[in-house]
Image (tube, helix red, strand yellow):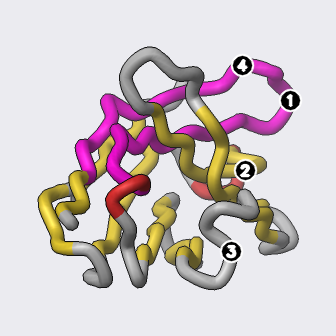
Amino acid sequence: QVQLMESGGGLVQAGGSLRLSCAASRSRSSIIVMGWYRQTPGNQRDQIASRSMIGGDTIYADSVKGRFSISNDKARSSVFLQMNNLRPNDTAVYYCFAKLRGGSAVYWGQGTQVTVSS
């Protein structure tokens, strides 16, 4: 298992920026991928960005390409989501996720609220 601790959510005006952080309780070598989903009330949880902890490959949802950037701390088991040019429809609860080597389970953080005002 792995515990994920998120931070960095908050309230920002449209056009502003926020940076989310997610720290995992396991060593980086035991994690195969980390990333972020987001969810609004009544809707499914959608993946918006992920990063391979092996090769560094990244994947972005079309809705955030060019505005969001995912990165990781090479010394630790942490990922970051830099969110620029935020829009009101980016308002959601953002969840960090991780998958471990040798397993299929997805582990989730507790979620952090991001609110973008117009």
Q: Choose the circle earlier in sequence order: 4 or 3.
A: 3
Q: Which residue is mark 1?
A: 102
Discs 3, 1 touching: Cβ within 8 Å: no
- Residue at 38% x, 67% y is 87
50 versus 76 height, above or below: above
> In the image, residue 71 lies at what x, y percent?
57, 76
The kind of residue on which mark 1 rests is Gly
Residue 103 within the segment the image draws in magenta: yes
Residue range of the region highlighted in magenta in the rendering: 90-114
**In the rendered structure, are the residues bearing label 1 and label 2 in contact, judged by CB atoms less than 8 Å apart?**
no
Answer above or below: position of 9 versus 68.
Answer: above
Q: Secondary structure at mark 3?
A: loop
Identify the image quadrant of residue 70: bottom right
Given contact means CB atoms under 8 Å apart, are the residues at marks 3 and 2 in contact?
no
The residue identified by callout 4 is: 105
Mark found first going from the N terminus, 3 or 1: 3
> Label 3, label 1: how many angstroms apart (C-alpha)?
30 Å
Q: Nearer the viewer, mark 3 or mark 1?
A: 3
Residue with the most extreme left position: 11
In terms of secondary structure, what is the magenta stretch mainly?
strand
Identified at 32% across, 29% down, the residue is 110
As measured in the structure, the alpha-carbon distance from the residue carrying label 3 to the one carrying label 2 is 19 Å
In screen coordinates, is 36 left or right of 52? left
Sequence-first disc among 3 and 2: 2
Q: Dot 2 corresponds to which residue?
A: 33
Label 4–label 3 contact, CB within 8 A: no
Query: Can I make out residue 51 in this image?
Result: no
Q: Which residue is mark 3?
A: 65
Residue 107, image quadrant: top right
Q: What residue is at 49 percent from the left and 29 percent from the top?
A: 108
